[in-house]
Image: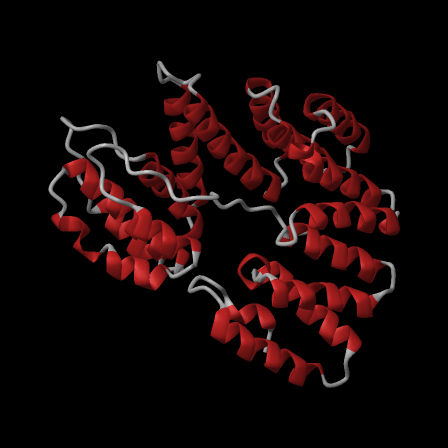
Amino acid sequence: MAEAASTPASPPAAAPGFPDLSVPYDLATRGQWKALLSHLAPASHASHPHHRLLLSALSALSLAKLRRYPDAAALIASLHPDPGCSPPPFLLRLLHALLPLFLPDRPLALDRLYTLLSSVRARPDADHPEWRRRDAIVASLLAADHLAHREFDVALALLAGVAEREPGNPALLSRLGYAHLQIGNLAAAAAVFRHVESVAGDGPAHASLLARNRALECIVGKDFAAAVREYERCIEADPGDAVAVNNKALCLMYSRDLGDAIKVLEGALESHPTAALNETVVVNLCSMYELAFVNHADVKRSLTDWIARVAPDDFDPSCTRM
């Protein structure tokens, strides 16, 4: 199943004394990482040291999005924060911690991520909403890595800690339920999801999240028709919800309705290419083509040609397996 990803609804307003980030924001939201890298090339000439660090962090992010991980790591290593200025931007510190995962050097990445998490929690303003949000980001990244390596106890402890710090946040609480599902503890997952429902209530703000949680429970119970109905609620609220679209298509495929599954993914790519075009959706669509069509190579070639015209710079075209 696809993982959710969020994009800010509008560009952040420039703080007093900080550079205008409206153009970088626009390029990033459209996936134009090469153009963003060129736009940021004069970052080394910024007058304020902290501004140089901020713009360099965006350059490192662009390099990472383009899978130029050694270049991103080298850029960060070349920076020398001024001790008399503000601490380095959080984005820079997070990239510094994450990049070893892609080089790969997992022990170094874990050491840096745990160090970053400790520094966030040791801040005198750690209870500020922004720092709580950053705490949840780092802890969730650590939990995801531990889950991927089947280190379940550590992952659950991290997510339980996040849930304890954010007892009223349904999205963060749901992550703990997803982890329980992943390791097969269905009773614990159901208990978490019932708690999420009590916290979220019946308002529209969390309707899609609650439907997504119910859909996952239906999938575990192999009630794919009910899961499809829940994902349709998510799509009705947000037609560009690539996770719901992808998972609805998979449920249709598991129900032996391969034709409709293909139509769901093709329709999403045609109607909402910016939101729906990710590697998970394309991999699943190509797998369905291989199952459904004798001439699947021709169909996949047409898809590959279309992707080449519309995909963002960080899209991995190898996912079509051409």
- Residue under the point 74% across and 28% down: 202
Residue 64 visible to the viewer: no
Q: Depth check: give the residue in front, 250 or 17.
A: 17
From the image, which quarter does the C terminus lie in? bottom right
- Residue under the point 70% across and 81% down: 296
- Residue under the point 61% across and 19% down: 167
- Residue under the point 64% across and 78% down: 300
Residue 52 visible to the viewer: yes
Identify the coloring.
secondary structure
Side (left or right) of 160 relative to 48 = right
Q: Depth check: give the residue in front, 131 or 160.
A: 131
Where residue 314 sits, quadrant-wise, is bottom left
| Location of residue 178 with respect to 259 vertically, above or below | above
| Location of residue 98 with respect to 180 vertically, above or below | below
| Location of residue 158 with respect to 230 vertically, above or below | above
Q: Position of residue 301 (x, y in %)?
A: 60, 82
Q: Depth check: give the residue in front, 181 or 104.
A: 181
Side (left or right) of 246 relative to 141 = right
Where residue 180 sits, quadrant-wise, is top right
Q: How many marks?
A: 0
- Seen from this angle, which residue lies furthest top? 124
Q: Position of residue 251 (x, y in %)?
A: 80, 55
Q: Position of residue 231 (x, y in %)?
A: 75, 48
Q: Position of residue 135 (x, y in %)?
A: 46, 27
Side (left or right) of 129 relative to 72 = right
